[in-house]
Image (tube, rainbow, N blue to C red):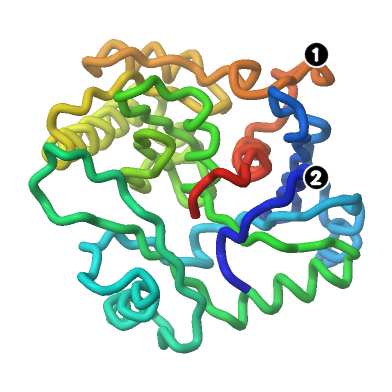
């Protein structure tokens, strides 16, 4: 199964398998403003994933968002080969970065924006996952009655949200919490420029306290912004958005006092129609990347 297969116009259900639960979202994209039809968390009893997934059954395609431990994402200089040979060249190039043989995995690429003023080589993201893992996920979904047609990753799910919030000619930074820590992405013109996993998690916030964790988080975000400026000098970063999360207001206040750019809490009502969710604040933060994956549109590049 290839990553990032095009979604149909019938809408999309996306889900993530998390410890003891499934986060999901369903978005109708047949309307001018995509509409959130469903979102939530399904508890999983023991290893009864099939029973839980069956609760997501519905018409239309389904997308699985892989957990970061299940794939590798690497930024590379784009090989100087014809487009039809790109994936083969990348497969060879990333072999030393994988803990499995590249021939035993699925490899896909994401183009990175390359403004005219940028002097470094054109770059791409390479994403790879074991075929055996993808096959297991496909069987699990099929047995639950799901039409699994798309395999997505956290970074592109986050990008899909950013696409609807960007301003022309300006980059947008989004920070979220995922199972492995904090995920910072920077996007430009609807495409991913940078993705970094930061060593700050909700658990660390509890252990070290907000002040100490904020100091570390601020430093890592600033380093990432500095790196972006070196790579894309001349492209301003419009703002940093914090995905829905616990203590988002406290994090926003702390980061805004230490970073030289606006910091805001991301409002999903600016991204899609949430009229069916009057208590949007009660929606679990773990649904954020499912919503992002469900926003994938046909015109979105892989």
Residue under the image location 38 percent in, 34 percent down = 189
Label 2 sits on a secondary structure element that is loop
Label 1 sits on a secondary structure element that is loop
Q: Position of residue 14 (x, y in %)?
A: 71, 48
Residue that badge 2 annotates: 10
Residue 235 marker: none
Residue under the image location 76 percent in, 55 percent down = 62
Q: Give the position of the N terminus as an image quadrant.
A: bottom right
Q: Position of residue 30 (x, y in %)?
A: 77, 34
Residue that badge 1 annotates: 278
Q: Position of residue 148 (x, y in %)?
A: 75, 63
- Dot 2, how many residues are within 10 Å of its Cα: few (below 14), some (14-19), or many (20+)? few
Q: Are the residues flagged by discs 1 and 2 in contact, CB closer than 8 Å?
A: no
Of 95 and 245, nearer the camera is 95
Q: Position of residue 211 (x, y in %)?
A: 34, 22
Residue under the image location 22 percent in, 15 percent down = 260
Badge 1 or badge 2: first in the primary sequence: 2
Residue 239, image quadrant: top left
The image shows residue 246, relative to residue 296, as above or below, that is above
């Amino acid at each position: 199964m290839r990553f990032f297969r095009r979604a149909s116009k019938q809408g999309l259900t996306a889900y993530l398998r998390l410890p003891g639960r499934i986060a999901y979202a369903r978005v109708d994209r047949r309307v001018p403003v995509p509409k959130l039809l469903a979102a939530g968390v399904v508890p999983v009893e023991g290893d009864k994933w099939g029973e839980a997934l069956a609760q997501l059954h519905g018409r239309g395609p389904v997308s699985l968002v892989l957990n970061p431990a299940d794939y590798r994402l690497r930024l590379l200089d784009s090989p100087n080969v014809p487009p039809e040979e790109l994936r083969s060249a990348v497969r060879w190039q990333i072999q030393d970065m994988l803990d499995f043989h590249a021939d035993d995995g699925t490899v896909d690429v994401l183009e990175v924006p390359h403004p005219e003023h940028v002097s470094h080589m054109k770059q791409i993201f390479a994403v790879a996952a074991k075929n055996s893992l993808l096959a297991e996920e496909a069987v699990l979904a099929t047995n639950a009655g799901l039409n699994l047609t798309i395999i997505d990753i956290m970074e592109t799910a986050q990008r899909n949200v950013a696409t609807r919030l960007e301003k022309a000619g300006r980059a947008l930074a989004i920070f979220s919490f995922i199972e492995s820590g904090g995920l910072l992405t920077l996007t430009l013109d609807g495409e991913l420029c940078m993705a970094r996993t930061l060593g700050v998690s909700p658990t660390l916030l509890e252990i070290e306290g907000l002040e100490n964790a904020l100091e570390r988080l601020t430093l890592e975000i600033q380093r990432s912004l500095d790196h972006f400026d070196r790579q894309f000098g001349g492209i301003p970063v419009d703002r940093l958005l914090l995905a829905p999360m616990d203590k988002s207001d406290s994090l926003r206040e702390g980061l805004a006092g230490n970073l030289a750019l606006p910091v805001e809490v991301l409002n999903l009502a600016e991204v899609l129609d949430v009229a069916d969710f009057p208590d949007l604040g009660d929606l679990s933060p773990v649904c954020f990347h499912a919503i992002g994956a469900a926003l994938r549109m046909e015109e979105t590049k892989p």
